Image: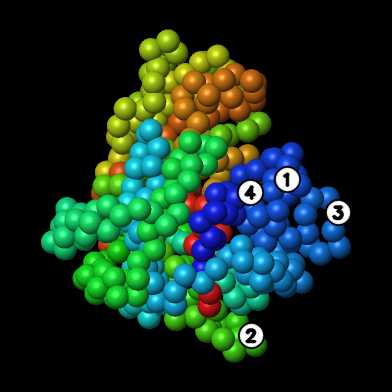
Amino acid sequence: MIAPPADKSHLVASRSYLTYSKAELRDKLERNPYSYLHVINPTGIGSSKVKRGTVPFFEHVRKRYLDFKSMGWLQLKGKNCIAIYRQSSEEHACTGIIGSLSLEGIRSGHLKLHEQTLKRREQLFAKYLHTVQCNAEPVLCAFDDGSIPEADAIQNRLTQHTDKRADLDFTTTDQIRHSVWILSEEESTDLAAAVQELSPLYLADGHHRVASSLALDSLDGATQHSSSLMAYIIPESQLLIRGYHRELIDVAWSAEHWDAALQRLQPYITAERISRTELSKPKAVGIAHLHTSGQSWVLSLRECSVDRVDAEIIQNRIFEGLFGIEDVRNDPKLRYIPGTMDSHQLIEHSDSRTESAIFEMHPVGTDQIKATADRGGFLPPKSSWVEPKLRSGLFIHEI
């Protein structure tokens, strides 16, 4: 495992570069030489002859990664060590294991998936891994702490380990505290033996990272192969799942037009206009809110079940049924809004746009995710916003 030294860990670890505005990214690159953004965004800001997503760009990433290692800003903590990682804020806390999952075990079905990946993205990420030869973002996995007998024992073991002083401990500007305990090889071996009994694991976030790791062997010219990938494993009860909202654009419907259209969807969906002074987030699975400029509705999705999630019903009955949208991944009329925005922010957003409609979604239940994974099915794209989100560069797995 590769990680930053204790005195620079808060400076090295970064969010995904996609979450920064251009101004924020420029500021980080100009003012913080230790940020892992210099590795994943090696050509900086502005014009560059090297196109992002190409092998030459990936070669620049590899060079910057080696530069960070040579300067001691990333260090080997042990070849076979496991880390305990705790992420905590006022809203949420979780504690789990950072370690490696066997790709052979994944191929054998010990890791259950619930999202369909895009082939072109799988191949792109596989080329990235093949060139850069490391991965700086663990996938997020959960185990069922209601049905696996070993769960309590493992949680107790984590608690015992985390009683000692953390090797890395810092708080980021989003008010999240990150605490890391790096175990010795002997401790890691003992804990790994206990974790072997946790099967199946459910993949909560990182489906394309898993698919690209599995695709490495099939790349043309691939001579080095990975046998594992890095994962953060936590109990199911410590996942924080938010809704992933939808926005239809270029829809200039009046409130009366929406009333008439929603009326035609009965008995599948019932709709009721509601005063915004009484409105909070959707109260349960099977309930969604529709916001347009100046008006909101509560939608009751009568087809909702463990096997049929809200996003699928909205997709089939409204996006396809009313607007003819079949390709929800790529249709330009459809946008996705992360579940970090609350009801009031979504209403403000909809009121600022006269030709859009926002569907505020309740989070998918863990029972729905597991039922989908158990039967080998797939949830609709962007059905859930899952946390914790891990920082890039805090843990690195070399291939």
Q: Earlier in the sequence, mark 3 or mark 4?
A: 4
Picture coordinates of residue 122, whole percent (x, y): 56, 68
Mark drawn on residue 31: 1
Left or right: 344 in relation to 371: right
Q: Position of residue 22 (x, y in %)?
A: 73, 42
Q: Nearer the viewer, mark 2 or mark 1?
A: 1
Mark 1 is on which residue type? Arg
Contact check, label 2 and label 4, Cβ < 8 Å: no
| Earlier residue among tags 2 and 1 | 1
Residue 220 visible within the image: yes
Q: Mark 3: which amino acid? A: Ser
Residue that badge 4 annotates:
18
- Residue at horizontal 37 percent and vertical 34 percent from the top: 91
Find out whether the residues at labels 3 and 4 contact each other: C-beta distance under 8 Å. Answer: no
Mark 4 Cα-neighbour bin, 10 Å: few <14, some 14–19, many ≥20: few
Secondary structure under the numbered disc 2 in the rendered image: loop
Circle nearer the N terminus (3, 2): 3
Q: Secondary structure at mark 3?
A: loop
Q: Earlier in the sequence, mark 1 or mark 3?
A: 1
Colour logic: rainbow
Q: Which residue is tagged 2?
A: 220
Mark 2: few/some/many CA within 10 Å (<14, 14-19, 20+):
few
Chain-order first, disc 2 or disc 4:
4
